[in-house]
Image (tube, helix red, strand yellow):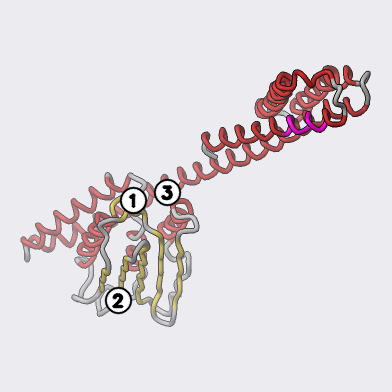
Amino acid sequence: MKKSIEISVHLFFWIVFAAFAFMLSQIYLQAKPDATFGNHLLYVISLEVVMGLIFFYTTFFGIRWAHKRISRYLILSAVLLFLLLFFAYPAMSFGIWEVLSSIIPHIIVIFLAVIFRRFSDSIRLEQEKQALLLQNTQSELALLKMQISPHFLFNTLNNIDYLVTFDTEKASGSIAKLGAVLRYMIYDAEVEKIALEKELKHIEDYIDLLRLRTSGDNYLQYRLNGRPEQWRIAPMLFLPLIENAYKHSSAKEGENIISIDIRIGKSSLQFVISNEYDTYRKPTAKAGGLGLNIVKRRLELIYPERHSLTITKDNKRFKVELTLELDEN
């Protein structure tokens, strides 16, 4: 819970508490018009609010600071003892109504302080858990980049080395694309969200380099529909899926072995990738290993309830469909 929201909730509670104390005082004065505090109503309500604040925050912060259960019980016992000695005991000479009216509001305040403390702690623990998950996922993403880069770099450099002899112009262009891809992996992908246009340019450069490792002009089909200029997206969501499709494809030559289709809508993006696979080596949801698992975890953390990821297969093709809501620039 954000600090500003928590403060607003506390302020609202004390406004309601002051109104509640005023209503109880009015009810009491209607029952006993000759009550001595009738001419000092504002002072009495202010005193009730001040004492309520003391009881509430002694309990609220005391429970937070007390790490052991016995310490928390001692704090609650001390607060209740103070309430009985300084409120209930003096009121006994006036009657049971006075006793009840003096302690019930404060008991309610103490009870609500315990509820608020438990709720605040549960929110804080959940935020810490999410932060830890995000930190772990970022570490895994760094590991993923370290795994992809050497493997990708080794194979691409081998192909560029071959091109240097037969097509120097293409080799030079490939070196420039390789530099752009590695720069993106190492530097640009450190942010939480990046321009979708830059992410797509990275994918296109990566695909161009991937084609150096395959045979056939139509081995990999890539289609893009829609305008990416106004949107942002988490970086490197698609690269593990593309690498996974290449790794588990049935062959490194042929027609339409890998198909990539990206559609950008009004506020969402659909990424569909499929690849042929050998029927004797049936893929599963774990086929992507670390890469696919990291994609799933990043989606859960960065796009909670704002994405869908579907993995299907038929007799010949393995297919991954990812749909997510985009963020505006």
**Local crowd at mark 3 within 10 Å, few (<14), some, or many (≥20)?**
some
With 54 as the anchor, is 325 left or right in this view? left
Q: Which residue is mark 3?
A: 140
Query: Secondary structure under badge 3?
Result: helix
Amino acid, disc 1: Lys
Q: Which residue is mark 2?
A: 257
Amino acid, disc 2: Ile
Q: Which residue is mark 1?
A: 145
Q: CA distance from mark 1 to mark 3?
A: 9 Å
Depth order, front residue of 49/69: 49
Q: Residue at x 21, y 62 (%)?
A: 209
Q: CA distance from mark 1 to mark 2?
A: 25 Å
Res 45 quadrant in image: top right
Q: CA distance from mark 2 to mark 3?
A: 29 Å
Q: Is residue 179 magenta?
A: no
Q: Position of residue 43 (x, y in %)?
A: 72, 18
Res 101 quadrant in image: top right
> Disc 1, disc 2: CB below 8 Å?
no
Mark sitting earlier along the chain (1/2): 1
Q: Position of residue 308 (x, y in %)?
A: 46, 64
> Disc 2, disc 3: CB below 8 Å?
no
Q: Residue at x 45, y 70 (%)?
A: 311
Res 299 quadrant in image: bottom left
Q: Which residues are magenta?
A: 20-28
> Going by the picture, which residue comes out furthest to the bottom?
315
Amino acid, disc 3: Glu
With 69 as the anchor, is 242 left or right in this view? left
Q: Residue at x 46, y 69 (%)?
A: 310
**Local crowd at mark 2 within 10 Å, few (<14), some, or many (≥20)?**
many
Residue 185 lies, with reference to residue 68, above or below; the image says below
Depth order, front residue of 263/164: 263
